[in-house]
Amino acid sequence: MIAVLRRLSFKSGYVRNIATLMTGTALAQAIPIAISPILTRLYSPEDFGIFALYMAIVSIASVAVTGRYEMAILLPKKDGDAFNVVVLAMGLSCTVSGLLFLMMVLFNQSLAELLGAPSLSRWLYWVPVSTLLVGIYQSLNYWVNRKGHYRRLAVSRVTQSGSSALVQLGGGYTGSGAAGLVGGQLIGQALSSIVLGKLIYREDRAEVGKITKPRLMAMARKYSDFPKYLIAAHGINIASSQMPVILLGMLFNTATAGFYTLTQRVMGAPMSLIAGAIGDVFRQEASHSYIQQGSCKDIYQKTLKRLLLIAAPLSVLFFFAAPWVFGFVFGPAWHVSGEYAQILTPVLFFGFVVSPLSSMFMIAERQQVDLAWQVCFFAAVGGSFFIGMLFSSAKVSLMAFSLAYSVMQIVSGLISYRLAAGKFL
């Protein structure tokens, strides 16, 4: 695949950065995919369902912990200012995660019952730990992205994936149930944050001396639009992406949520491997071009073409092979996940092509537009599951969701293209 990208290259440094990230991300994604056939025989669909609900809550709560300031780390012209934004985001992560812990203590049982999974109750206490680790890692991740040190990102991703896999395998063989899946995730998050933090401190420790309270407050004020608009916008976006897991668990059962989770786990691999790496590099290159020229249309167009060339054949292959592959590789009990995957192929295609380019909303600082789109997207996803509920069918819900997702991603792509061309909405 890297050879393909080289043939499609339009800037050697650009492709080299993509290749570096892809190498690390490939290893990081290969590990969980490689052990998935083992995990599906060690854990039940119900276990995967509990884990999916836990991660859904973590994903939604994590949006607020940094105030979304980490997304502003790429914007300051001076590294000293950018590093103050890093510290600001991590400080907020500690504060907000502490408040979240109090909420989990007060509303623990009520939340578990609302989600239709009473056994999730004991794991809710660990949600603030996960959100804190996510906030720290994302802040460090954007700093590394700004500096163009993609090797560090690759190392941290392999660390997280490998350590999580080892713990989850160990937990499965000891019959720990959902505890093995949740515990593996927590340990992977912690180790990857530690590794990335050490790498940054070793080479960028001079920036620590530039941290001052006045500069922290100045950066907080300068980029106040990020928490003002992006917490709501990205909270709605994550809620929309996690809504299928939550609603499948609430409307049907945790096993159904587990089937969907395996589908997402397998479908997410190529997206994270290629589109994620391209998105990281595009964000850095496009930010630089936009700051200097007020436009990054050429980079946008060339990136879009390459994403389309990769996505089209992968999606066609995935559509026809999914049901057979899931049943054969993961066991007969998981054939339903293959049927879900076939239904969700358009989600794979449009997510692959459009998501890496959606950072244009932040690069162009059009957070208001992003918020409006996210609200419409949330309504579309919610409406799709309402249709499925009327038919009392998980498959109908997923068909409606696939259609709604595709339409909204097309709209997002059209808007981000206008922003890349310097046309404001």
Image (spheres, rainbow, N blue to C red):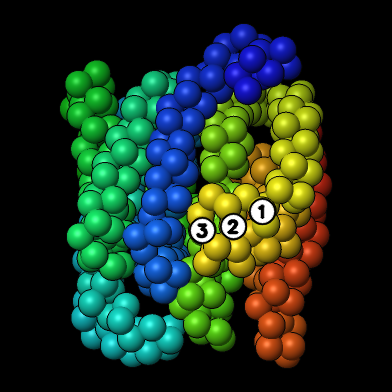
Residue placed at 80% from the left, 52% from the top?
410
SS at circle 3 = loop
What is the spatial separation of the Cα atoms under label 2 and label 1, in whole angstroms? 5 Å
| Mark pair 2, 3: CA separation | 5 Å
CA–CA distance in space, label 1 to label 3: 10 Å
Residue 95 image position (x, y, % from top left): 24, 61
Residue type, mark 2 in image:
Gly
Which residue is disc 3 drawn over? Answer: 331
**x and y percent of residue 91 in the render?**
25, 51
- Seen from the viewer's position, the closer of residues 174 and 122 is 174
Amino acid, disc 3 = Gly
Q: Which residue is mark 2?
A: 327
Residue corresponding to mark 1: 324
Q: Nearer the viewer, residue 109 or 89?
A: 109
Q: Residue 159, relative to residue 49: is it above or below?
A: above
> Looking at the image, can residue 219 be seen?
no
Count up the numbered dots.
3
- SS category of the residue bearing label 1: helix
Residue 1, located in which quarter of the rendered image? Answer: top right
Mark 2: secondary structure: helix
Does the CB distance between marks 2 and 3 fall below 8 Å? yes
